[in-house]
Amino acid sequence: MKIKNFYDIVVVGSGPAGGMTAMTASRKGASVLILERDREVGIPVRCAEGISLTSLIKFFEPDKKWISKYIEGAKLYAPNGEAVLMPSSAIGKGVILKREIFDAHICNIAVENGAEIITNADVFDLIKKNGKICGVKFRHFNKEKIVRTNLVIGADGPESRIGRLAGLKTFSQISDIEPSAQYVLTNLKIEHKFSHFYFGKKIAPGGYAWIFPKGENIANVGIGVRADKCNGKNAKEFLDEFVSRNLPNAKMISFITGCVPTGMTLKKITADNIMLVGDAARQVNPVSGGGLSNVLLAGKIAGNVAADAVKMNDFSNKFLKKYHKIWMKEKGNQQKLLHKLKEIFFDFSDEKLNDLTTHLNQIPSEKLTQFQLLKTAIREKPSLVKELIRYYL
């Protein structure tokens, strides 16, 4: 495939954040090139693949081609094994995606609107002229290539080489980076109508384990932990212990590892001729580590601002930081509060988690919501009321 010498926008990374940004910008008439390091869009899948149905339909009409399972609620397990059921009537339905197909679907829409994609394209440097970013360098089948652009968008994950090359501060505290490991397992006997979450310092210190059903006897089974609380053990070791204890007859289909950024949005996610989106900008939910709904929203905002920058021929940080401002209003300020809640919830002792579960089971399941968990956090730390007033009222 022959590429042009110039594109209005170059997006580095074809995951949901990059794909959504490219799709949105191309729909508004910008010429867009997506550069993907891996050989295929959506592969490998580094995600538990869950999203709420309410969040999904804000952006796409559900399609059975990229949906594995509809979920009717969640079960939360305390360290002692007691479970709390949060039905869909209280928290809404969920969806387990086929991410490799879903990601490709987003990029396909971008291509239908004029965007182009190159896979096996490893971006290793930015081109600058008089200190101004004006393109990228990438390796494609052992050949170095360049492409010029007015705007580079880094959607290249939590390590974000693009962010570092642009001089943006992408450092995260170790407490805000969670190593994770996940199997796709079959030969399971599980309640496949629900997603399952397991908490406890011995199970997953600073995080939790999950079972996300993809069918009646198959599921994503994973774990996320805080590296500074693991006493030398890694995420896979915790996961293997969890599987051995809870799913002894399971058979493995695949295995992945990664790191999930669970901090707040970076203080600066734009500069002249550069934007960061998704994990690169730290836009996930700090409590759950879930990122799909957040990064789809971020990609839509970034794509709209990027397309407007093309129309105005203004790629200055003064113009581009509108994206950051809109994001903070839509989700970023809520993310700040969730980060505070994360520090409280994941610092609970196992005894307190057991007591909390017993208390929650006294509430009718149809009335159990995330707000009940929030009330518990407020009881533990009354100063959070001020944060609620600041960010919501």
Image (cartoon, helix red, strand yellow):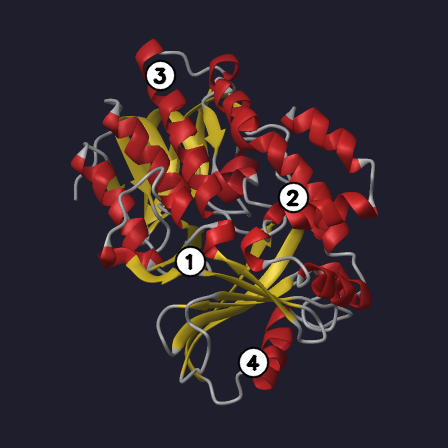
The quarter of the image holding the N terminus is top left
What residue does disc 2 label? 263
- Residue 49 lies, with reference to residue 283, above or below; the image says below
Q: Residue at x 71, y 61 (%)?
A: 227
Q: CA distance from mark 1 to mark 4?
A: 19 Å
Q: Residue at x 37, y 43 (%)?
A: 138
**Place of residue 4 in the rendered image (x, y in percent of width and height, measured from the top left):** 21, 31
Query: Mark 1 or mark 4: which comes first in sequence?
Result: 1
Asked if disc 4 and disc 2 are in contact, CB closer than 8 Å, the reply is no
**Place of residue 121 in the rendered image (x, y in percent of width and height, measured from the top left):** 33, 48
Query: SS at mark 2?
Result: loop
Q: Which mark is residue 308?
A: 3
Q: Within 10 angstroms of label 1, few (less than 14), some, or many (20 or more) residues?
A: many
**Side of 327 where 333 appears, left or right:** right
What residue does disc 1 label? 49
Tell which of 282 and 63 is nearer to you.
Answer: 63
Q: CA distance from mark 2 to mark 3?
A: 29 Å
